[in-house]
Image (cartoon, helix red, strand yellow):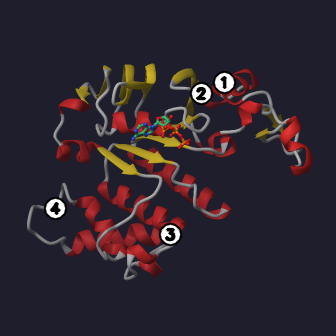
């Protein structure tokens, strides 16, 4: 399904954070949302997920205005993997995953054997099958992120929003998650928007990118053209560039490293939050 973000201005209270953002995410695309801390990536995700109503503009999913949908209609269209999740109740991992099917499973009825089998299969694929009977509350941050991905995949929505889903994952699990999400999107022709702080994960796995700074769009389109030196430096400042490894792989690296003893004098102010 195509997600159309049309001239969105949005924020909190009366303070605008997003300023006139327009982007189109076609079906089957794995799109990265990139930008410095506080640039408005999560705010844009909240608008797409209809948690936040924009001051102006519209978000359409296959021509349906998300602000007009009920919560259960939205949950059938959009799966969301948040930055972090806390559970007040002592649910097990498999219960958390099965909750992703709440809009499919009829009210007051228990998940079927088939639902449970499917949930277990997804856990196996993600590599958390050994945790299914564990309490969600007692998992590590990275394990929780993997459970939330399993839950979103069990939800089986045509649109997936992933807000820094790799932030607590180790190196191998980051690549595993990116591979898995990419594979699901391509198999199901779904649309995914993922916020990532590591631009190299974007280069390796995403089809397109949306680059933001201070609530405004800097560029969007194919990853290679969107994350060019000029755009990266406009968003992040001067100390970033694209390079190529000896094996011909594109990478994004700092131009120079700042060591602790001289970082305070030499590093430009814009690199501090
Ligand atoms: N609930 C809120 N109420 C008021 N202001 C908020 C709220 N959430 C975020 N903001 C502000 O909106 C701006 C954008 O925040 P947002 O979380 O969307 O940025 P981000 O790009 O996702 O940042 P990060 O990369 O650090 O996660 C920030 O200035 C932040 O302080």
- Whether label 1 touches label 4, CB < 8 Å: no
Image quadrant where residue 252 sits: top right
Q: Which residue does the numbered mark 2 point to in the structure image?
A: 222
Confirm or deny contact between disc 2 and disc 1 (CB under 8 A): yes
Q: Which mark is residue 143?
A: 3
User: For the residues marked 2 and 1, what is the alpha-carbon distance in whole angstroms?
Assistant: 6 Å
Callout 3 secondary element: helix
Q: Earlier in the sequence, mark 3 or mark 2?
A: 3
**Is disc 3 in contact with disc 4, using a CB cutoff of under 8 Å?**
no
Q: Earlier in the sequence, mark 2 or mark 4?
A: 4
Q: Position of residue 46 (x, y in %)?
A: 37, 39
Q: Residue at x 49, y 33 (%)?
A: 40
Label whose residue precedes the other's in the sequence (1 or 3): 3
Marks 3 and 4, how far apart in space?
25 Å
Q: Mark 2 and mark 3 in contact (Cβ < 8 Å)? A: no
Whether residue 246 is visible: yes
- Among the two numbered marks 3 and 4 on one chain, the one whose residue lies closer to the N terminus: 4
Q: Earlier in the sequence, mark 1 or mark 4?
A: 4
For the residue pair 244 and 37, the one nearer the viewer reads as 37
Residue drawn at point x = 40 percent, y = 81 percent? 134
Q: Residues within 10 Å of mark 4 (few under 14, many from 20)?
A: some
Element type where label 2 sits in the image: strand
Vertical relation: 182 (above or below) 147: above
Q: Secondary structure under badge 1? A: helix
Per the model, the C-alpha gap separating discs 2 and 4 is 38 Å
* Picture quarter with the C terminus: top right
Q: Which residue is mark 4?
A: 105
Q: Position of residue 109 (x, y in %)?
A: 10, 69
- Read off the residue under disc 1: 225
């Amino acid at each position: 399904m195509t997600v159309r973000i049309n001239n969105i201005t949005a924020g909190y209270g009366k303070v605008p954070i997003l300023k006139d953002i327009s982007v189109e995410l076609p079906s089957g695309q794995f799109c990265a949302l990139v930008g410095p801390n506080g640039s408005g990536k999560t705010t844009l995700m909240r608008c797409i997920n209809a948690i936040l109503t924009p001051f102006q503009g519209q978000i359409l999913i296959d021509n349906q205005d998300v602000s007009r949908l009920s919560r259960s209609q939205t949950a059938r269209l959009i799966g969301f993997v948040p930055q972090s999740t806390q559970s007040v109740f002592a649910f097990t991992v498999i219960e958390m995953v099965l909750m992703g099917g709440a809009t499919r499973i009829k009210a007051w009825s228990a998940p079927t054997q088939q639902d449970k089998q499917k949930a277990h299969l997804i856990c196996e694929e993600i590599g958390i099958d050994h945790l299914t009977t564990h309490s969600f509350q007692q998992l590590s941050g990275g394990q929780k992120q993997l459970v939330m991905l399993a839950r979103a995949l069990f939800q089986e929505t045509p649109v997936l929003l992933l807000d820094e889903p790799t932030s607590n994952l180790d190196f191998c699990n980051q690549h595993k998650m990116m591979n898995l999400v990419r594979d699901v999107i391509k198999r199901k022709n779904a649309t995914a928007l993922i916020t990532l702080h590591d631009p190299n994960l974007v280069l390796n796995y995403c089809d397109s990118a949306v680059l933001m700074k201070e609530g405004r769009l800097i560029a969007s389109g194919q990853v290679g053209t969107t994350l060019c030196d000029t755009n990266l430096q406009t968003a992040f400042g001067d100390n970033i560039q694209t390079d190529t490894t000896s094996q011909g792989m594109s990478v994004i690296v700092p131009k120079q490293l700042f060591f602790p003893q001289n970082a305070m004098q030499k590093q430009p102010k814009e690199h501090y939050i």
